Amino acid sequence: MMRNPSTTSLTNPPKKSLIQLAADKSSIGADVCAQLFNGSSDPILILSTNLQIEFANIAADKFFLSSGSRLQGKYLKEYLTAESLPKILSAVKHIQREVSQFRLEINALDGHRQEIVMDVTIFPIVDKRSIRSFHVVLRDVSQERQIEELVREAQKMEAIQYFVSGTSKELQHPLLAILKRIESIESKYRGRSFEYLSFKEFTSIINFLEVMRKQIKYCYGITEKLTNLNKKRLKFENDYCQANAVIREIARLKKQSFKSLDVQLKLRLSANLSSIGLGELEFNQIINHIIDNALQAIPAGGCLTIVTSNVVNSHQVRIEVSDNGVGIAPENLPHIFEPFFTTKQHGVDRSAGLGLSIVYSLVKAGHGQIHVKSSLRKGTTVQLIFPVAEHVKELQHSRK
């Protein structure tokens, strides 16, 4: 049996309904007001102050009921999950106190008693300066939330892919250097009797082994960090490093990259630089990410400059990495540390938008500071400030 949309849920209302109130204050009739509500594809409810349903449009009846019955006279709590009812009650208290609309997200039960995520907006209906009922508009957002969850999962997978790619690159450089050194020794001394090695040659082999030991230790350090990724926050051991030595080693390893891109690298390193209170592996990652990020913005013939210095009258070390690349637009500058944020589409490798986010996390975990200044078509300067190793040890001792 077909229902008349103009009279749906309006039979013998306990008091003047919202539709009748609207009709009383306008030139249109109650039937037309009812048709307006029933013309909505979203469920619409009129609730009394004790959350009894006074009116429900056709969309609400179809959503909440599997049969042809009506919602009028029932209580809203019958169609809410246990977790959502307190949210609605809290929203009602807020509306009664502030006399203003309120928006929230809940889980409602449809006609098949399945949980559906709903976006809910509640409006107070005021009659003679007091709230007489509530006008509730619901919207099914379950599909939107499912899509958002799929997007988040895709972003996680993308993050893992870029992280693995970046880590692979960090391992690739030292492993390639080890391979080349082994091949060099092998080709030079294959077929020779070691009893005829000169002291100079023997010393050269020992130096080779020392360099390889450091590079293998570096690779092992990276893999060790990977095994600790499940920790909630980065916790560095009482470690320190010589920033100048790390920068020189990175410059040596990246020499070919700078050459192939026709970018000049200038180092202005303080002769008496204090050790910083950050491990060699962490500082290496920071500088590598900053340099890689800069190389994507520097055109052929450009220049990248690294300057180190002790901060006067302070237990701090300053490292500045400057380039004369394309620069960063003012509107983008506040977002550069956000994961996945990137404006680069070309260069050595398209940016994943993770480099500076990783840098920021490492710097903050190492009690450091990072500041970025940039001008379009002029270039960018990244300033790092770290406490000196001795000061970090004093702070750690005082906190025990």
Image: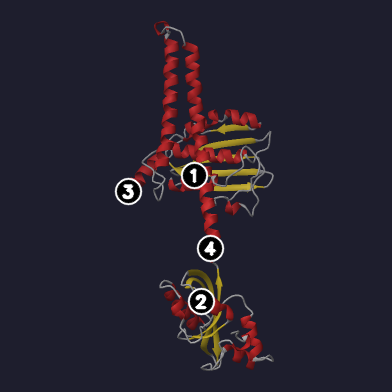
Is disc 3 in contact with disc 2, using a CB cutoff of under 8 Å? no
Please tell me how many numbered marks the rendered image carries: 4
Amino acid type, residue under disc 2 in the picture:
Ser
Q: CA distance from mark 3 to mark 2?
A: 67 Å
Camera-near label (3 vs 2) is 2
Mark closest to the chain's N terminus, 3 or 2: 2
- Secondary structure found at label 2: loop
Q: CA distance from mark 1 to mark 4?
A: 42 Å
Residue of label 4: 145
Residue of label 2: 66
Q: CA distance from mark 2 to mark 4?
A: 24 Å
Mark closest to the chain's N terminus, 2 or 1: 2
Question: Vertically, is 334 above or below 267?
Answer: below
Mark closest to the chain's N terminus, 2 or 4: 2
Can residue 185 be seen here? The reply is yes
Is disc 2 in contact with disc 1, using a CB cutoff of under 8 Å? no
Horizontal side of residue 398 vs 281, given as left or right: left
Camera-near label (3 vs 4) is 4
Residue of label 1: 385
- Secondary structure found at label 1: strand
Q: How is the image coloured?
A: secondary structure
How crowded is the residue under tag 3: few (<14 C-alpha within 10 Å), some, or many (20+)? few
Mark closest to the chain's N terminus, 1 or 3: 1
Amino acid type, residue under disc 1 in the picture:
Ile
Question: Vertically, is 206 above or below 3?
Answer: above
Camera-near label (1 vs 4) is 4
- Secondary structure found at label 4: helix
**Relative depth, front residue between 167 and 118:** 118
Amino acid type, residue under disc 4 in the picture:
Arg
- Picture disc at residue 398: 3
